[in-house]
Amino acid sequence: MSNHAALSDQALAQLFTKAHTQNAWLDKPVSETLLRQLYDLLKWGPTSANCSPARFIFVTSTEAKARLKPHLSGNNSEKTMAAPVCVIIGTDYNFAERLPQLFPHMPSARDWFADPKVSVPTAERNASLQGAYLMLAARALGLDCGPMSGFDSAGVDAAFFAGTSVKTNFLCNLGYGDPKGVFPRAPRLDFADAAKLI
C-alpha cells in the first residue's frame, strides 16, 4: 500500500492545469547541471521490461542549432532558435541490446524482442512515454516546454543519428517561457467524451 500523499494544488497546476505549450522564450539560460538533473528524474519513469528506448540529444550550442534549423517546419524554426534548449527525443530500435544491463534478472529478455512486430511498437510506445516523462520532469524543475512534431524526420535523423539505430520521435523546446507567446487555453474533452468506467 502506498504512503504517498497527493500533490498540492500548486504542484498539480505547475505540471498540468496551468502549464501551457510555450512558443516564445525569455533570454535566460538553462544550465547543463539542470539538464542532467532533468534526465536523472525522467529515467525513473516506467517502461516495458525497463527497456528505456528513448535517446535524448539536448541541442544547446549555436553550431548544433544551425544543423537542426534546416529541418524545422514553418515558425518552428524561429521559436526553436530562440529557445535555450531543443531536445531531440529519439527512439532506439535496437533497445533490446541493453536489456542484459537494464533487466538483468531475466536473461532471456532480449529474445522477447527478436521479432520486429514486437520490438518496433514496443520501442515507439515506450520512447513516447519517456518523452512525456521528460516534459513532466522539466515542468517539475521549473522549466517550460514546447513540444513539436513539425519537422523533417529524415533530415534530423541524418544530422544527428546517422549510423545509429535511433530515429527521431519528436522535438521539445525547453527554457523559461515568455508569457507573451502563450496562446489562450484550448478546450479539452470532458470525461464523458473520452473515458468510461466499466
Image (tube, grey):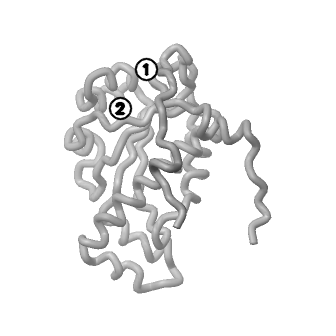
Which numbered disc covers residue 82?
A: 1
Where disc 2 sits, the SS reads helix
Q: Residue 33, can we see it?
A: no
Q: Residue 83, can we see it?
A: yes
In three-dimensional space, the C-alpha distance between marks 1 and 2, rounded to whole angstroms, equals 13 Å
Q: Is residue 88 above or below residue 93?
A: above
Q: Residues within 10 Å of mark 1 (few under 14, many from 20)?
A: some
Where disc 1 sits, the SS reads helix
Q: Amino acid at mark 2?
A: Ala
User: Quick one: label 1 or label 2, which is nearer the N terminus?
Assistant: 2
Q: Are marks 1 and 2 in contact (CB under 8 Å)?
A: no
Q: Position of residue 192 (x, y in %)?
A: 50, 50
Residue at position x 30%, y 62% in the image: 93
Q: Position of residue 160 (x, y in %)?
A: 30, 43
Q: Amino acid at mark 1?
A: Ala
Q: Is residue 3 above or below residue 87?
A: below
Question: In the image, is 134 to the left or to the right of 14?
Answer: left
Towards the viewer: 197 or 44: 197
Q: Position of residue 109 (x, y in %)?
A: 41, 80
The quadrant of the rendering that contains the N terminus is: bottom right
Residue at position x 48%, y 17% in the image: 181
What residue is pinned by disc 2? 64
Residue at position x 55%, y 56% in the image: 43
Q: Nearer the viewer, mark 1 or mark 2?
A: 1
Q: Position of residue 136 (x, y in %)?
A: 57, 44
Residue at position x 38%, y 42% in the image: 88
Q: Is residue 36 above or below residue 146?
A: below
Question: In the image, is 64 to the left or to the right of 155?
Answer: right
